[in-house]
Structures are given as C-alpha cells and as structure tokens.
Image (tube, rainbow, N blue to C red):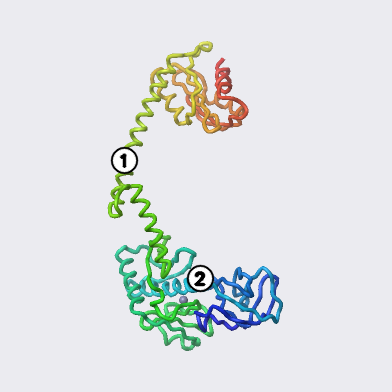
C-alpha cells in the first residue's frame, strides 16, 4: 500500500519515494503526494524524476502514476506536484463543501453530485427551481463562512463512530472513513484535498444555474478563479460598452434597442423584397412563350433560393392563371427549379420528376406545383430550363 502523503499534508508538493512496481506506462510508489482522480476532484499534475506525470489513478488499491517512460523497480525518485493546480483544486473543493452546506442550512437543498472542471465548478441539487434571491442568500452565507476564517479539520474514524457525526450522506467506504469537518457547519466524508482554513478559499461566486429535469445545476468558482472570471467579464463588458456606445449600466437598454431596431428592419426588408419580386413577376409576364397550345412564362434567375422562386411564381400566377411557370436558378453551386400552373392541364409533378435524374436531384410537389434541386456540375441552368420546356412539347 502506498502511503498517501496528500492526506497527511495537502500543502506538501515535493517528496522522495521508491518505485515499488513498474508497469508498461505507469509506476507505483512507496509513498506519494500525487492525488489520484476521485470524488469529483481531478488528479494532480507534475513530474517524477523530471518526467511529466500524464495521469494519476487509483486502480485495484494501487495509485498509478502514468509516465511516457517507465522507471525500474527500486529506483528512488523525486516527485514534484504542480503547486498552482493543487491549490486551485483545494480552493474549489473546499468551496464546494461550503456552498453545499449553505444550500442545506438555508433551504434544505441537497447536493447529489459535484464536478470540478478546468474553468468552472458545478454541483447538482435535488430541486427543480432555485430563485435568484435564494442564490444570493446562499452565496452570502458561503462567503460569510470564509470571512469567519473557520478551521477545516480532517479526522479518520471507524464505521462504528459514524453515528457520532451529523453526516450528510452515508460514507461510500466501509472502513478508514475520512471526515472533513467545518465545526458547527459542515460534516462530510470526503477523500479530497482541502486547505486548513476556510479563509484560504478567499471567495465563492455563483455564476448561474441550469435546470436539468428534476434537478438544478449550479455553476460557481472559488478563489483565484473568481478574479479570473471578473477579469474576463470586465474585458467583455469593456468591449460591449465600446460597441454599443453605452456605459455598463445602460448596456441592457442599448442591446434591447438594437434588437428591436433589427426586428423592424427585417420586417421592412421583407416587405421591400416582396415588392421587388412583384416587379420581377410583372416583368416576366411581358414575355410569354408559346409552345404548341401552351403558354409559358420561363426564366433563369440569378442567386434565388427555392423559396424566392416560389414567391415570384405565385405572383405571376396571381396576375395570369392561364400560363405555365418554369423558373430556374443557380445558388451556392446548386440548381433549383419551380414549375407551377393554375388552369392549364400540365402535370407539374411529372414534369419535375422527368428532369431530376439530369441534376442528380431531389424534388416533390403535386399536379399544380412542383419543385426540385440538385447539382450544378453536369448541366447549366439554361440547359435545365431547356429540358423543362421540351417536356411541354
Ligand atoms: Zn472534500
């Protein structure tokens, strides 16, 4: 069994140990300060004899330090832990204990899971909704616990002693139970690394919540991450105040004004586009082609979407219901076409189907109106229109 130095002193970041086992890509040591992934907390990083430790995991009771090159059994090695990463994890983990306890203390909401991410930390609470007022009060109590500089104790107990402590959950391990205690506030069975005092957590900031079925995920950061968050948010706000030409307090009003103006402009643009399409339809109606006893309005239009072709076609037929409309357009490297009529006896669905193989395309519709689209590689839009016209002969 490896001696777990991280349980004796969470601040120890250098150590010496003997290699007890040497696998293909990992080693097991006589003692280690490297915390293995577990209990929601990621593993430590650092070096062993100068080699980067890529992962640390506890498997079958052994703590495996993964390395690119293995080290022979019996070698005495020097381990160095990435101090900043360890302390960050200590801050986030202790912060999580405090926040979890504050939710229980004020509202009885229980934490069902915890995740310590690279940017933010989350806990899932067994409640569907949490109000902003509740969040604010919880955040305030959590930060008060930090300001009161409460001691954080750790204690090893046996299964029999568990009942002496007001634990939130039954411990997941049977024996050698490790308690993390903030006296008169939080009693927890936990195997993570924590600072000695709540003051070292520095600050807790709730960033937001996300509803997940019957639970709520609370996102937060502690310690140095609060400063980082504030820095990032300040950078964003500064950019926005410049872009919107409004001070921070008026950003919301300025953004709303912009959004509403955008909506109005979109409406106006849509109306103008319709007017243009009406004119295009009127223009096309000036040249009606006769094929046999059928009269046809036909055109190749530039950069029109299928929806736009359909709108123009509708306007044409609204003015003259006795023509057949055949419109083709090439847009973004694809061919699109619409065939439509009101009074004539032409089956537009059959007409559309007959040209689809030529453009390796897909289409649909009914007797009166059909459309399709496909590749522009094999034939041009003019050739496609010619094919459609031929079908009317
Ligand atoms: Zn813990």
Residue 70 lies in quadrant: bottom right
Residue beneath the point at 54% across and 31% down: 373
Q: Quick check: marks 1 and 2 in contact, CB under 8 Å?
A: no
Position of residue 289 in the picture relative to residue 32 (left or right): left
Instruction: Please tell me which residue lies in front, 172 or 85.
Output: 85
Alpha carbon distance from label 1 to label 2: 47 Å
**Residue at the image point whose x is 41% and y is 74% from the top:** 201
The image quadrant where one finds the C terminus is top right
Q: Quick one: label 2, few (<14), some, or many (20+) residues within 10 Å?
A: some
Rendering quarter of residue 129: bottom left
| Badge number at residue 93 | none
Left/right of residue 236 with respect to residue 31 in the rendered view: left
Residue 140 point in image, percent of width and height: 32, 70
Using a 10 Å C-alpha cutoff, classify the residue at mark 1 as few (fewer than 14 neighbours), some (14 to 19) or many (20 or more): few
Question: Residue 182 location in percent, x, y?
Answer: 39, 81
Residue drawn at (49%, 65%) of the image: 117
Count of numbered circles on the image:
2
Residue identifier under label 1: 261
* Viewer-nearest of discs 1 and 2: 2
Horizontal side of residue 347 vs 210, given as left or right: right
- Label 2: state its secondary structure: helix
Relative horizontal placement of residue 141, taking residue 334 as reference (left or right): left
Please identify the quadrant where the N terminus is shown: bottom right
Q: Which residue is the site of mark 2?
A: 85
Q: Secondary structure at mark 1?
A: helix
């Amino acid at each position: 069994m490896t001696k777990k130095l991280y349980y004796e002193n969470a601040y120890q970041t250098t150590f010496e140990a003997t290699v007890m086992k040497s696998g293909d890509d990992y080693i097991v040591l006589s003692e280690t300060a490297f915390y293995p992934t577990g209990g929601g907390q990621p593993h430590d990083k650092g070096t062993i004899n100068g080699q980067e430790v890529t992962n640390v995991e506890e498997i079958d009771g052994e703590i495996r330090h993964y390395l690119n090159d293995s080290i022979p059994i019996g070698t005495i090695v020097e381990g160095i832990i990435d101090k900043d990463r360890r302390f960050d994890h200590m801050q986030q983990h202790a912060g999580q204990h405090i926040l979890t306890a504050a939710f229980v203390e004020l509202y009885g909401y229980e934490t069902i899971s915890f995740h310590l991410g690279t940017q933010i930390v989350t806990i899932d609470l067994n409640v569907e909704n949490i109000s902003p007022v509740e969040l604010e009060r919880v955040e305030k109590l959590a930060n008060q616990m930090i300001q009161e500089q409460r001691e954080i104790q750790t204690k090893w107990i046996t299964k029999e002693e568990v009942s002496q402590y007001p634990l939130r959950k039954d411990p997941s391990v049977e024996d050698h139970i490790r308690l993390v205690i903030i006296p008169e506030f939080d009693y927890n069975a936990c195997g993570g690394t924590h600072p000695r005092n709540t003051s070292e957590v520095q600050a807790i900031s709730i960033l937001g919540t996300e509803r997940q079925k019957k639970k709520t995920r609370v996102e937060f950061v502690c310690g140095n991450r609060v400063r980082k968050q504030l820095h990032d948010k300040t950078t964003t706000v500064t950019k926005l105040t410049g872009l919107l030409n409004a001070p921070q307090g008026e950003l919301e009003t300025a953004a709303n004004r912009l959004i509403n103006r955008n909506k109005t402009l979109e409406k106006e643009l849509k109306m103008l586009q319709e007017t243009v399409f009406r004119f295009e339809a009127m223009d096309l109606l000036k040249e009606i082609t006769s094929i046999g006893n059928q009269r046809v309005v036909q055109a190749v239009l530039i950069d029109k979407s299928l929806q736009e072709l359909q709108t123009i076609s509708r306007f044409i037929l609204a003015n003259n219901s006795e023509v057949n409309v055949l419109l083709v357009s090439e847009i973004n490297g694809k061919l699109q076409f619409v065939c439509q009529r009101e009074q004539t006896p032409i089956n537009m669905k059959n007409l559309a189907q007959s040209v689809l193989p030529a453009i390796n395309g897909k289409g649909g519709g009914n007797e009166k109106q059909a459309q399709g689209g496909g590749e522009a590689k094999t034939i041009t839009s003019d050739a496609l229109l010619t094919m459609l016209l031929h079908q009317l002969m």
